[in-house]
Image: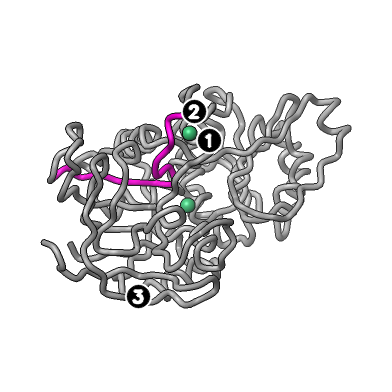
């Protein structure tokens, strides 16, 4: 296998183009596995790598942290994974096991968290090498293309909702009907929440109802806060849009003890009126994806409940086009690269 050339799509410098290059096939370390990539989702956070927005990235770097494929080689000290197993890797690309968070078993907040496509080369490639703790098993019922987008967009919405404290029948509002939002609506509905979708434009109403929302609020023509208050207020608002401003605008729609959970990545400050929070005991939190085991739970729950990402599929060579579709917000709803393996 040594010396065999394989394709990678790399960024050579911040704001540089996504360029397809041939590289030597990488060899796994003792506690690593090599995965033959079949599919990799294109996530908004890939812009950290493409645009140079994450401190400490070493270039050239191959983006991609929604990886699905087949293990083809395991390192010499790996006994828990075998060649031929179908596996997936998400934002949790490895942890140190020694920092305070790891010592508490809270691996996803590891001080030295590794992220595929940021800390090491990710899934826009024919092959990827990952440490064993980053690996999740893919159920037989899911194809690689179905599994990939569940590894960041899926797990983040699923894990944020299942840890939100909301109970069956509670009102959960999802802001945004995009890559994250269209999955969040499905998960919230399948978890038994009274699910309200908030988007821009009347044209999304039919789709969100098909995905499981019982109400749709068009924030272009309706006041989201007034509509949420009419519906009794939301126990949870899941903010999936990459905009602090858009998330801040709906805070008044939180019920007593309600909570805004932010998962759409944005540098925009959130304007928070203290009175609203004090008088109604409301709160605002963020939620970071989850571990490889949380990913595996996401895949299992998706099989159980029928949740699927709606994808636009591109061959690996068309990664630049897929990335632009995602960044422009035009992708319906998640862009996924496939290698043909
Ligand atoms: Zn750690
Ligand atoms: Zn992501």
The residue beneath circle 3 is 318
For residue 109, the mark is 1
161 and 206: which is toward the camera: 161
Q: Is residue 112 left or right of residue 9?
A: right
Question: Where is residue 150 drawn, in percent x and y?
Answer: 38, 46
Does residue 92 show up magenta in the picture?
yes
Of the 4 image quadrants, the one containing the N terminus is: bottom left
> Which of the two discs, 2 and 3, labels the residue nearer the N terminus?
2
Q: Is residue 7 visible?
A: yes
Q: Which residues are magenta?
A: 84-98
Q: Is residue 19 left or right of residue 329?
A: left
Name the residue located 42 percent from the left edge and 57 percent from the top edge.
117
Residue density around tag 1, few if under 14, some if 14–19, many if 20 or more, within 10 Å: some
Q: CA distance from mark 2 to mark 3?
A: 37 Å
Does residue 197 show up magenta in the picture?
no
Name the residue located 33 percent from the left edge and 52 percent from the top edge.
67
Q: Decide: marks 1, 2 in contact (CB < 8 A)?
A: yes
Q: CA distance from mark 3 to mark 1?
A: 33 Å
Residue density around tag 3, few if under 14, some if 14–19, many if 20 or more, within 10 Å: some
The residue beneath circle 2 is 106
Q: Main secondary structure of the magenta part?
A: loop
């Amino acid at each position: 296998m040594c010396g065999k050339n394989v394709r990678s799509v790399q960024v050579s410098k911040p704001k540089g183009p996504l360029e397809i290059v041939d590289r030597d096939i990488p060899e796994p370390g003792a506690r690593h596995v090599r995965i033959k990539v079949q599919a990799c989702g294109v996530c908004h956070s890939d812009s950290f790598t493409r645009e140079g927005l994450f401190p400490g990235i070493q270039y050239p770097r191959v983006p991609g942290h929604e990886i699905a494929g087949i293990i083809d080689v395991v390192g010499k000290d790996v006994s828990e994974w075998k060649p031929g197993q179908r596996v997936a890797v998400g934002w949790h690309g490895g942890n140190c096991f020694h920092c305070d968070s790891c010592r508490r078993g809270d691996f996803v907040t590891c001080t030295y968290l590794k992220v595929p496509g940021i800390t090491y080369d990710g899934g826009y490639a024919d092959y990827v090498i990952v440490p064993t703790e980053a690996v999740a098993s893919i159920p037989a019922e899911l194809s690689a293309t179905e599994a990939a987008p569940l590894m960041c967009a899926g797990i983040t919405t699923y894990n944020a909702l299942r840890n939100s404290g909301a109970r069956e029948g509670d009102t959960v509002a999802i802001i945004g009907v995009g890559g994250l939002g269209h999955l969040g609506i499905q998960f919230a509905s399948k978890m038994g929440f009274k699910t309200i979708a908030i988007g821009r434009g009347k044209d999304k109403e039919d789709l969100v109802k098909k995905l499981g929302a019982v109400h749709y609020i068009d924030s272009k023509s309706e006041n989201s806060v007034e509509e949420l208050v009419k519906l009794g207020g939301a126990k949870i608002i899941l903010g999936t849009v990459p905009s602090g401003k858009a998330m801040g605008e709906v805070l008044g729609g939180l019920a007593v003890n309600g909570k805004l959970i932010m998962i759409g990545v944005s540098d925009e400050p959130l304007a928070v009126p203290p009175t609203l929070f004090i008088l109604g005991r409301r709160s605002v939190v963020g939620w970071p994806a989850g571990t490889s085991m949380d990913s595996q739970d996401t895949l299992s729950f998706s099989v159980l409940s029928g949740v699927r990402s709606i994808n636009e599929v591109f061959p690996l060579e068309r990664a630049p086009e897929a990335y632009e579709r995602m960044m422009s917000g035009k992708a319906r709803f998640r862009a996924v690269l496939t290698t043909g393996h």
